Image (tube, rainbow, N blue to C red):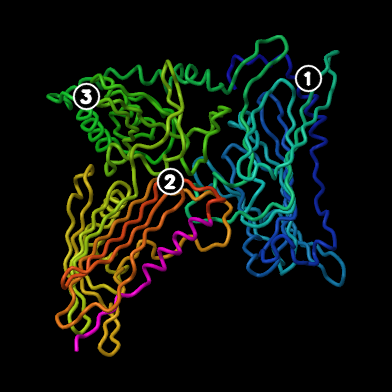
């Protein structure tokens, strides 16, 4: 906590108060009932492999010269069947400075109508220093059978940033949860923000206060409880933003402190004060002011360039190719930008702040925009919580057009954000008129394919394909080629194309990252036709737009999030063998999804001895709510049905 917080005169009183509270932070161990061991089907989810019967936590803010959080936790899990045995292998990650004690664990079984307990001995608890900053407590439950109940409990003292974030708590798991309860205890001198994500309506709240006296002063203690009952298992679905986005959980952040006899101090700013706070920080606004050393290089790179867009492209190219991203996502710098620049390695903020500074050095308007990545969850636009943000990009005005620019990857075009950054809105940090900005340029998942195919009278098919990939599809190919090389990429294509023999292959524009990637492929189609007497039957879709239907579930819990618009185009020219005529072709269709949310157009026309097939899929809307799921499901089902239809050729008599 900042040194300006005046708390020293309250040290003794806080210790006395917390000593009394700690005596209340007890959760009985071994409180197992005989009915818990009868392994009756759990009505809300009778197919579950295991069930969390209860997950209880009591967290209290304490002081003994340093502020810390003490969490007492107790978890009971019933193993329903053998598929649930893995839940008897426990791994609990903690910060390296956390202190874990009072660890207990037992397996409970029913034998001869009685409850038996198998205790895990202390020597079986193993602490693994899994990384420099994290450690993991590991243990395995013995004597586990179908119907066993396992229970473990522990107390952990958390320091580091625990004062600021209390105890993030997940009410949901990948198995059903019968009951999950978190109680948080802290004195009135602290004010915390809390945000519940996921199924927030399922979380019940009981906010209470108690009172105590010290030195004739009445002290209010907050005792706040959040709890859920019969929380369903978290089930992953295709095209969701992230697990973090939808898992039902609660996060806290210290908003302010207000000790008697000292001034109120805002810890987490509101959005109205966020800009001022960040611009004053040495690892944010001040870092952008100490970048005069970059001007010479920026001027050298842009010498002779007269327009801002060209300057942006040149500086982005230089920074992304010469600064190595260390894989750490952050919205603040890791240290001096001068040091990072000469080390040529840094976190995402280091690199993008260098980009912003070099653009400013050549009079291109560029400002930081902070955001939360998709894998980190969405930000709350109504309540500012600093821990929500984990990334920063440049917001650049070039040629009277604004671009969101990231320089952490030399393979990505300047106007294509990392896909993980396409997450609603970010917050522009600028001295005047800070605002929320949509996190997108004009990115797409786009590809187009032109195919020329020749069929002989024996039903053999040969031809050429020309695939053109844009934006994220192009980036994915460049990344794969960087890892595997062109020969390795070709090998992967061959492995995936079991019904097509690739006889020729070349790539274009691999090194031109602002251009589309183009593949030229010569193929022989193996077993691509069916011969039925004097007829040849074949399906024209060698690579269907929707080869596997991702939307086969009956219902949907979470929004369908494509991230970007989707565009898939196919044009096929197919030459009919001499002596054959077209007997049957799929009918043309024009499918619509919602109000211009998407479309699918299929046409098949004959021009002399050639069939011309066009297939165009467009998804314009990026997020569909669960209430719209049935429309998406029907839309893709119709596409699959159309793509399964056959063309029939008949030999002329």
**Residue at the farthest right position:** 113
Residue lying at 19% horizontally and 86% vertically, measured from the top left: 652
Query: Helix, strand or loop at disc 3?
Result: helix
Q: Is residue 636 above or below residue 13?
A: below
Gap in Å between the C-alphas at discs 2 and 1? 58 Å
Q: Give the mark nearest the N terminus, 3 or 1.
A: 1
**Residue depicted at 29% across the width and 56% down the height:** 569
Residue 13 place in picture, x, y as percent: 78, 19
> How packed is label 1: few (under 14 Cα within 10 Å), some, or many (20 or more)?
some
Quick check: marks 2 and 1 in contact, CB under 8 Å?
no
Place residue 279 in its image quadrant: top left
N-terminal of the pair, mark 2 or mark 1, is 1
Percent of width and height locating residue 425: 46, 34
Image quadrant in which you'd find residue 98: top right
Tell me, yes or no, whether the highlighted magenta stretch contains residue 625.
no
**Spatial distance from mark 3 to mark 2, Cα to Cα?**
39 Å
Identify the residue position indicated by label 3 in the image. Answer: 298
Q: Which residue is mark 2?
A: 621
**Residue named by callout 1:** 13
**330 left or right of 406?**
right
Q: Nearer the viewer, residue 592 or 94?
A: 592
| Picture coordinates of residue 441, whole percent (x, y) | 34, 37
């Amino acid at each position: 906590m900042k040194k300006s917080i005046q708390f020293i005169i309250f040290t003794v009183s806080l210790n006395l108060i917390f000593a009394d509270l700690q005596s209340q932070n007890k959760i009985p161990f071994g409180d197992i009932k005989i009915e818990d061991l009868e392994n009756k089907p759990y009505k809300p989810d009778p197919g579950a492999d295991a069930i969390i019967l209860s997950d209880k936590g009591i967290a209290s803010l304490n002081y003994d010269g340093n502020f810390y959080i003490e969490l007492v936790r107790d978890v009971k899990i019933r193993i329903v069947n053998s598929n649930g045995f893995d839940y008897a292998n426990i791994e609990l990650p903690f910060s390296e400075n956390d202190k874990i004690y009072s660890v207990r664990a037992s397996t409970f079984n029913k034998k001869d109508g009685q409850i038996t307990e198998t205790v895990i001995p202390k020597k079986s608890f193993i602490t693994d220093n899994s990384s420099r900053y994290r450690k993991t407590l590991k243990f395995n439950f013995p004597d586990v059978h179908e119907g066993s109940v396992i229970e473990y409990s522990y107390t952990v003292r958390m320091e580091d940033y625990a004062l600021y974030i209390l105890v993030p708590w997940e009410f949901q798991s990948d198995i059903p949860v019968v009951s999950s309860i978190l109680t948080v205890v802290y004195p009135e001198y602290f004010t915390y923000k809390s945000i519940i994500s996921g199924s927030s309506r399922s979380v019940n709240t009981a906010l209470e206060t108690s009172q105590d006296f010290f030195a004739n002063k009445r002290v209010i203690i907050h005792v706040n409880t959040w709890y859920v009952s019969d929380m369903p298992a978290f089930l992953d679905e295709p095209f969701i933003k992230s697990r973090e986005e939808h898992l039902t959980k609660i996060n806290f952040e210290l908003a302010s402190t207000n000790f008697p006899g000292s001034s109120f101090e805002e810890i987490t700013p509101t959005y109205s004060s966020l800009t001022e706070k960040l611009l004053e920080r040495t690892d944010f606004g001040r870092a952008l002011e100490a970048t005069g050393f970059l001007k010479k290089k920026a001027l050298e790179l842009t010498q002779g360039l007269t327009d801002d867009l060209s300057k942006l492209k040149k500086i982005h190219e230089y920074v992304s190719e010469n600064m190595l991203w260390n894989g750490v996502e952050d919205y603040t710098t890791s240290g001096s930008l001068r040091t990072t620049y000469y080390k040529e390695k840094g976190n995402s903020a280091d690199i993008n702040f260098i980009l912003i500074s070099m653009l400013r050095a050549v009079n291109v308007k560029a400002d930081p925009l902070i955001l939360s990545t998709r894998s980190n969850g969405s930000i709350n636009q109504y309540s500012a919580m600093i821990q929500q943000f984990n990334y920063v990009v440049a917001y650049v005005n070039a040629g009277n057009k604004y671009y969101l620019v990231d320089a952490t990857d030399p393979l990505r075009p300047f106007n294509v954000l990392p896909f993980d950054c396409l997450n609603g809105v970010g917050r522009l940090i600028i001295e005047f008129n800070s605002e929320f900005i949509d996190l997108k340029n004009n990115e797409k998942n786009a590809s187009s394919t032109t195919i020329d195919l020749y069929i002989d009278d024996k039903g053999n098919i040969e031809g050429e394909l020309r695939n053109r990939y844009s934006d994220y599809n192009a980036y994915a190919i460049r990344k794969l080629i960087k890892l595997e090389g062109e020969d390795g990429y070709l090998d992967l294509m061959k492995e995936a194309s079991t019904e097509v023999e690739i006889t020729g292959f070349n790539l274009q524009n691999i090194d031109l990252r602002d251009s589309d990637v183009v593949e030229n492929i010569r193929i022989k189609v193996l077993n691509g036709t069916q011969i039925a007497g004097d007829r040849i039957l074949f399906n024209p879709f060698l690579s269907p737009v929707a080869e596997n239907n991702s939307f086969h579930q009956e219902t949907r819990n979470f929004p369908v999030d494509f991230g970007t618009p989707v565009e898939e185009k196919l044009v096929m020219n197919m030459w009919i063998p001499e002596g054959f005529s077209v007997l049957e072709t799929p009918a043309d269709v024009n499918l619509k999804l919602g109000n211009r949310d998407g479309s699918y157009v299929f046409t098949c026309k004959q021009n002399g001895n050639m069939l011309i097939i066009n297939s165009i899929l467009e998804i314009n809307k990026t997020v569909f709510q669960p209430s719209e799921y049935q429309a998406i499901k029907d839309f893709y089902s119709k596409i699959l049905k159309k793509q399964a239809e056959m063309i029939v050729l008949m030999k002329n008599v």
